[in-house]
Amino acid sequence: MRIRYKKWARPELEASKFYEDNPEQWKGKWKNHYENTNNPMHLELGCGKGQFISELASENQQVNYLAIDLVDAMLGLAKRNIEQVYNEKNIELKNVIITRFDIERINLILDEKDKIQRIYINFCNPWPKGKHRKKRLTHTRQLEKYKQFLDKDAQIYFKTDDEDLFNSSLIYFEETGFEVISKTYDLHNEPIFEKNIETEHEKMFSNQGIKIKACIAKLK
């Protein structure tokens, strides 16, 4: 998603207690970045404006969340949305960290010591052209990178509107040693999650009559 430059985003992020500007320094020791170091750690790749992570994290305070995006403007909006949700629920914000980083180089900020137990990938760029498919966040090249920091029996929760990306991703998961334990081509009529938190894209596509494809893949 393209978004206009927001001059306030960088200063606000740098002043935020839950934004990390140097994620490389936390590689292998992310649990120490949170107040409750014993919480399991989950990861959202491409958090966008933060609507998903703000709802998810505020409802699951027993889990520590790391949300990643590459655009300051997006992260600035995510910061504000997260703060708003936590304020509305009168909850102390201590289980979320947001950071700016290129997901293609994610192994520079996470390793096996971080023991990520779940990854969320929501409506990522489908990169439909053949020469660009390696950029997909669910491509085998990326999945092999994730395996280096995932904990035993870790899961990936994936949602998309794009059927080609979805079908290809099912193959990618199998090729890299993941077992697809649940899948649907119509998430809103065939729920596979305990609770589905709709993203901004999800609402937009659903309103257009596009069915949401989703799956849960487990590391064997």
Image (cartoon, helix red, strand yellow):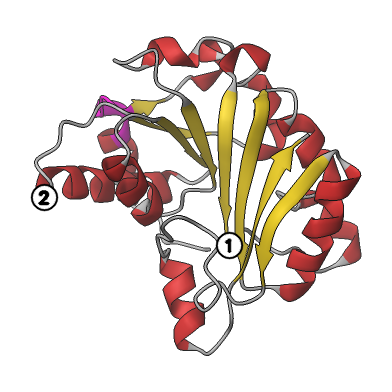
Expressed as whole percent of the image width and height from the top left, the position of residue 107 reads 69, 24
Name which quarter of the figure residue 165 lies in. bottom right
Is residue 15 rendered magenta in the image?
yes
* In this picture, residue 59 sits left or right of residue 67: left
Q: Which mark is residue 88?
A: 2
Q: Where are the magenta residues, as a range?
A: 13-18
Residue at left offset 68%, top offset 63%: 183
Residue at left offset 41%, top offset 65%: 198
Expressed as whole percent of the image width and height from the top left, the position of residue 132 reads 83, 58
Q: Amino acid at mark 1?
A: Phe
Name which quarter of the figure residue 203 lies in. bottom left
Residue placed under numbered mark 1 in the picture: 123
Observer-nearest of 48 and 59: 59
Task: Determine the CA span between mark 2 and mark 1.
Answer: 26 Å
Name which quarter of the figure residue 163 lies in. bottom right
Expressed as whole percent of the image width and height from the top left, the position of residue 95 reads 32, 28
Q: Amino acid at mark 2?
A: Glu
Query: In the rendered image, which quarter contains the C terminus?
Result: top right
Sequence-wise, the earlier of marks 2 and 1 is 2
Q: Which mark is residue 27?
A: none
* In this picture, residue 166 sits left or right of residue 68: right
Expressed as whole percent of the image width and height from the top left, the position of residue 197 reads 40, 60
Residue at left offset 45%, top offset 55%: 194
Is residue 24 rendered magenta in the image?
no
